[in-house]
Each structure stands twice: as structure tokens, then as C-alpha cells.
Image (spheres, rainbow, N blue to C red):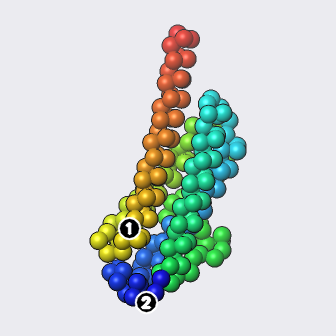
Amino acid sequence: MGKKGIEILGVDVQKLLQMLNEALCEEWLAYYQYWVGARLMEGPMRSEIEPELLVHADQELNHAVMVVDRIIQIGGTPVLTPEDWMKLSKCAYEVPSDPYVEAILNQNLTGERCAIQRYKGLADFTSGKDHSTHQMATAILNEELEHEQDIEDWIADIQKMKDDLKKIRA
């Protein structure tokens, strides 16, 4: 991005770069959380959920690409080492030590809700000022909202299955 482009952003560029680098770290952690969780997952509906979690992982990786591109466009440097991901991320990475499908889904749900807050914050910060970052943040926010809904639906389906089994056993 040229000097005039940066000049007209209308936001504190250093703060924006910090927010974008934090988002980048969170996207890498979210990608891995989805990817490894999908691989380890056990339990009901695994065969239906696993491929969808891998799609979510790919979308998180695409978010990281979008964020890196924007950081570079506005003259910043993206986080360069994985060691910094945990330090800069405001969203927790939860080790998938329990491979049960509901545990994996709940971990991903927590991550999605944190990402929703991240991109709402970025959208609010850039609204009416930095149109390109605002559009990017809004597009990513919409995907994060879809991910949250998918996960909530799977958790509800598993709960319904458990409830139905209880009725059969009673």
C-alpha cells in the first residue's frame, strides 16, 4: 500500500497492526486446534463431523492468509515465529487431551467465540475509517459466526442422540 493509502486509513496504524498480529496468531492456533482435533476425535457422528472440521481448519488457514496480506499491505511485519503465537493470542489453545467428540467440539466452540470477539473488535475499530480492513474483518466474522452455528448444531444433535438413547433404555 502506498503512502497515501496508509495516510487515509484514519486509524492508529500501530494499534491496528498489533490487533492484526494478535488475530494472525489466533488463526494459526485455531487452524491447528481444528486440524489436530479432527484427526484425534472419537465418538458419535465422528465420520460426519471430521470432514467438516477439516473444512473449518482450511478456512482458518485462509483467514491467516488474509490477515498476513493486510499486515503487509499497511506496512507491517507479520509475527515471524510460532513461539510468539501463544504469547500474542488472546484466544486460548486447548490441548485436545480428551478425544471425545463433544470435548473437541466444545474446545472449538470456545475458540470460535473468541474469534467472533476479535473480528467484531477489528470491524468496530476500522468501521468508516479503514474500509479494506473492515471488509476483511467482516468477511472473516461472518465465517466465524457460521462455524459457531455449525458446532452448536452438532452439539445439539449429539445431545438429542443421548436423550433418545436414555428414552430407549428407560
Residue at 33%, 81% (x, y): give it: 10
- Pinpoint residue 46: horizontal percent, then vertical percent: 64, 34
Q: Amino acid at mark 2?
A: Lys
- The image shows residue 25 at horizontal and vertical percentages of 56, 67
Q: Which mark is residue 152?
A: none
Extreme residue in the right direction: 40
Say which residue appears at 47% left-offset and 39% top-offset: 152
Identify the image quadrant of residue 99: top right
Label 2 with label 1: CB-CB less than 8 Å: no
Above or below, 127 relative to 14 = above
Q: Residue furthest left?
A: 128
Mark 2 nearby-residue class (10 Å; few <14, some 14–19, many ≥20): few
Q: Would residue 98 be seen by someone viewing this image from the given angle? A: no
Task: Indicate the secondary structure of the residue bearing disc 2.
Answer: helix
Above or below, 101 against 169 in this view is below
Place of residue 105 in the rendered image (x, y in percent of width and height, measured from the top left): 56, 42
Closer to the N terminus: mark 2 or mark 1? Answer: 2
Which residue carries the number 2 mark?
Answer: 3
Q: Is residue 34 above or below residue 83?
A: above
Amino acid carrying label 1: it is: His
The residue pinned by badge 1 equals 134
What whole-number distance in Å separates the C-alpha atoms at marks 2 and 1? 19 Å
User: Element type at marker 1?
Assistant: helix
7 to the left or right of 86 = left
Seen at 50% across and 79% down, the residue is 73
Q: How many marks?
A: 2
Q: Nearer the viewer, residue 72 or 49?
A: 72
- In the rendered image, residue 61, in percent from the top left (x then y), is placed at 60, 59
Tell me: residue 48, above or below residue 59.
above
Residue for point 51% across, 53% down: 111
Task: State which quadrant residue 12 falls in.
Answer: bottom left
Instruction: Name the front one of labels 2 and 1.
Output: 2
